[in-house]
Image (cartoon, coloured by chain):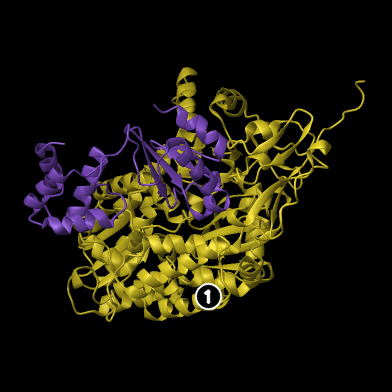
Chain colours: A purple, B yellow
Amino acid sequence: MNNDRIDQIIDKHQGEASSLIQILLDIQSENRWLPKEALERVSEKLEVSLTRIQHIATFYKAFSLVPKGRHQIHVCMGTACHVRGAQNVLDKVQDLTGIKPGETDSDMKYSLETVNCLGCCSLGPVMEVDGKVHGKISPAETAEVIKKYE
Amino acid sequence: MAQIKSPDELKKVREELLLRRDSGNPCISICAGAGCLASGAGEVIAAFKEEIEKQGLTADVDTKGTGCPGFCEKGPIMVIYPEEICYVQVKAEDVPEIISQTIKEKKIIDRLLYVEPSTGEKATQESDIPFYKNQERILICNNIKIDSKSIDDYLAIDGYAALAKALFQMTPEQVLAEVKKSNLRGRGGGGFPAGRKWEGTRNAPDPIKYVIVNADEGDPGAFMDRALLEGNPHSILEGLIIGAYTIGAQEGYIYVRQEYPLAVENINLAIKQAEEYGFLGKNILGSGFDFTVKVHQGAGAFVCGESSALMTALEGKAGEPRPKYIRSNIKGLWERPTVLNNVETWANVPLIINKGADWFIQMGTEGSKGTKVFSLVGKITNTGLVEVPMGITLRDIIYKIGGGIPGGKKFKAVQTGGPSGGCLPENMLDLEVGFDELTKAGSMMGSGGMIIMDEDTCMVDVARYFLEFLADESCGKCVPCREGVKQMLKILTNITEGKGRVGDIELLEELAETAINASLCALGQSAPNPFLSTLHYFRDEYESHIKEKRCSALYCKELIAYHIDPDKCQACMICFKKCPSEAIIGGKNMIHIVDQEKCTKCNTCLEVCPARFDAVKKISGEPVPPPIPEEERTIVRGGKE
C-alpha cells in the first residue's frame, strides 16, 4: 500500500487525530494488515506518536500487524455455536490447516480466527470463509468446504 | 428530494407517498437480514427480480429486501402483501412457481407454508404461526414491512411523525416528562432509567452536550440490535434526534461494531437520507434545531460496550474504561455531558412520543415497562428474535414461542445477560422476565441474549467458556479483573480437565468476591456471575467433576471415554472406516473396540453409528470396561449356511 493511498484515506477523515481508529480500519480492510511503513505515515500525518498507534493497533482485535493469508477463515465461538459444538468444528479446522487461531500458514493460503458472534445463531455452528457463511456445519463438512478454497 | 421544511410539508410528502403507493400491486417482502442472507436469501431475491422481468411484470409487482422479522430458524422467509401470505425456507428454485401460482393465480403453495410440528397445522399468515402469535411486537414488527434502505418506506409507516410532534407540539421539558413517565429503562443491560439519565445531562451547565447510540453489540449469542440497525435504522435515528432535542445536544454518534458490515452500511445510508430530507442538519423541519450524527466503527473490543470505554474509543484512543467518580451523563465524551443509550432504548423513544407514556406503561411489570427483544438461541426448536412484553415467564418464551427443546432432550438451563449474566435452572422457569426479577434470581437482563441449554450441556464448562471470553476481553487496566478472572479461568479449566482439587470451589468464591468488589468497570465486577450462578444452581456438577472426575453431561473431553457395547455392535465397519484417528480395532464380522490410547474423542464414531444399533456410548466417572477377549469377537451370522 503506497503513501498516496494512505494520504487519501487520511484526507477522507479530514486528517483528524480522533479519527485514528477509523483510518486504521480503512487501511486494514483494504490491505488486510497494517505494515510498519503505513503506521509511520499515519503517525507523521496525524501528528500522533507511533507508540499510541501501536497501543491501538494491538488493543483492538480487528487489526493485524502481520500479513494475512489469501483466505480468511472465521469460526464462530459465540455461546449459541458453543453449545452446538463449535469447539469440534474449530478442532477440525486446526487439524486441516495446521494453524491455530490468529495464525497464517506458511503458504499464505489460510488465516484462521475465532470470532465471538456472527449474529446468525440459528445456523450454529457457523464457519465463515472469505465472508461466506457456512451454517449448521459438522466437523466432517468443514473438510469439504476448506478444500474448495485454493 | 428537496428538504422538508415544516410539519405540514412532512404531512403532504407522506400523503403523496401513500397515494402513489396505493396501486394495489402485490408486494413481495423477503428478509434480507444477516440470518436469512446466510441461508440463501440473496439468491432468492435475485431470482425474483429475474423472474419478474422475464415475465414482464416489473410494473405490476413490487419486491423488497427487508429487515429481520425474527424467525431465523425458517429462513429465508418471505411475505406477500396485501394477503400477507408467509412462506418459509424459500429457495431460488421455488421462485417461478411462486410468481405463476401465488402472484398470478392467487393460489397458495402448500409446501412452502409453515407447519406447526406439534399439531401438523399449516399457517398461511405470519400471525397464525405460534412463534409470532405469542409475542408482543412493537419494535421489530416493522422490519418485514419496510425496505431497510428506503426512507420513503419508513415515512409511509408514520416515520418521523414523533420527531415532528416533539419539535412542534412539545417543549424539551415535556418530552423529558413523557420519557420519565414511561419509565423506559436502558435496554443495553444496566436497566438505568433513561429519563433520569437524560435529565442529569439536560440540567448539566455545560452548553456542549452529546448523544450516543451504543450499537457495539458484543455479547456472543445476541443479535437484537443488529436486526434493528439493519432492518429499521431510521427508527433509531428518530429516537436519537428526539433525545438530542430534549437534552440540548447538537452532535451525536453511533458506535457500531465493524463485525456488522450490513448494519454499518444501512445506518450510514439512513443518515444520508435523513440529511437530504431535512431530518438532520441545520434547522430541522424548520424548527430552528440543529443536529448532526457521525458513525464510528468499533474495531473489535468487547469492553467498548461499556459506556466510559466506548467514549474513550470515540475519542480515538484504546477503549479502556475510566473510573466513574462523576457519571458520564455529567462528564462523558471529551468530558462533556453525554447521554449514551442502547439501540433498542433509542428505538423505543419515537413510540413513546407518538403513542404516549400511558400506552407504554400498560405493558410490563411494576419495575420494567414495555417490551424486550431477546435473541432466543442454543438448544431450542425455534431459534430467532422474539419480542415479548416484560413480565412474561421464561417458560412461555421457551415453550410457547420457542417450541421447546429439540431432539427429545431435557431442558437444563437458560442463560441470560450475556457473558456477565447467569444460568437459571428448570425450577426458575416460572420467573417473570424483568430487570429486577432476573437480578434477584442471580442472573440479569443484559442486552437480551437468551441461550437455552439441554442435558448435554455441562454447566462447569459453560462457566469456563464465559470466563475464557471475559479473560480474553479484559482490557488489562485493573488488577482484580486482569489477574483475578485469569486465575478463575485457570481453576475452572483444571476442573473440566479432571485436575480439580478439593478446595477449588472455595478458592473460586474468594477470587469472585475480590473481582466483584474491586474491579474498575462492569466487565470485571460481573465477570464472576457465570461461575456464581452455575455454582448456586448446579453445585453437584462441580462436585462430581472434582471428586469423582465425572462430567454428567458427558461433555468434558478429558473426563469421558468412548466405548462400543459388544452386545450391540454389529461389526458394520462404518465407525471403523470413518474414525480419523484409526482408533477403532475390528474388521469384517469382528466386533469393534475403541483403542483408548489412540482415541481423540472427536465424537465421529457416535455420530456415524446407525441409530438401530446404537452401540457407541460415552462414559464418564467409571472405568472403561475391558475389551472382550479376541476369541469372542467374531460374529457368526446365521441364515447363509
Is there any visible trace of residue B479 in the rendered image?
Answer: yes
Q: Where's residue A28, x and y in %?
A: 24, 43
Mark 1: give few (<14), some (14-19) or many (20+) Cα within 10 Å: some
Quarter of the picture holding the N terminus of chain B: top left
Q: Where's residue A46, x and y in %?
A: 9, 53
**B73 w.r.t. B433: above or below:** above
The residue shown at (64%, 70%) is B547
Q: Pick the residue in front: B305 or B230.
A: B305
**Which corner quadrant of the image does residue B73 belong to?**
top right
Q: Amino acid at mark 1?
A: Thr
Quarter of the picture holding the C terminus of chain B: top right
**Chain of the residue displaying label 1:** B
The residue shown at (24%, 42%) is A33
Q: Where's residue B640, x and y in %?
A: 90, 21
Callout 1: SS: helix
The residue shown at (56%, 30%) is B91
The residue shown at (16%, 36%) is A1
Question: As drawn, is B240 to the left or to the right of B58?
Answer: left
Is there any visible trace of residue B443 in the rendered image?
Answer: no
**Which residue position holds label 1?**
B439
Question: As drawn, is B624 to the left or to the right of B417?
Answer: right
**B181 w.r.t. A72: above or below:** below
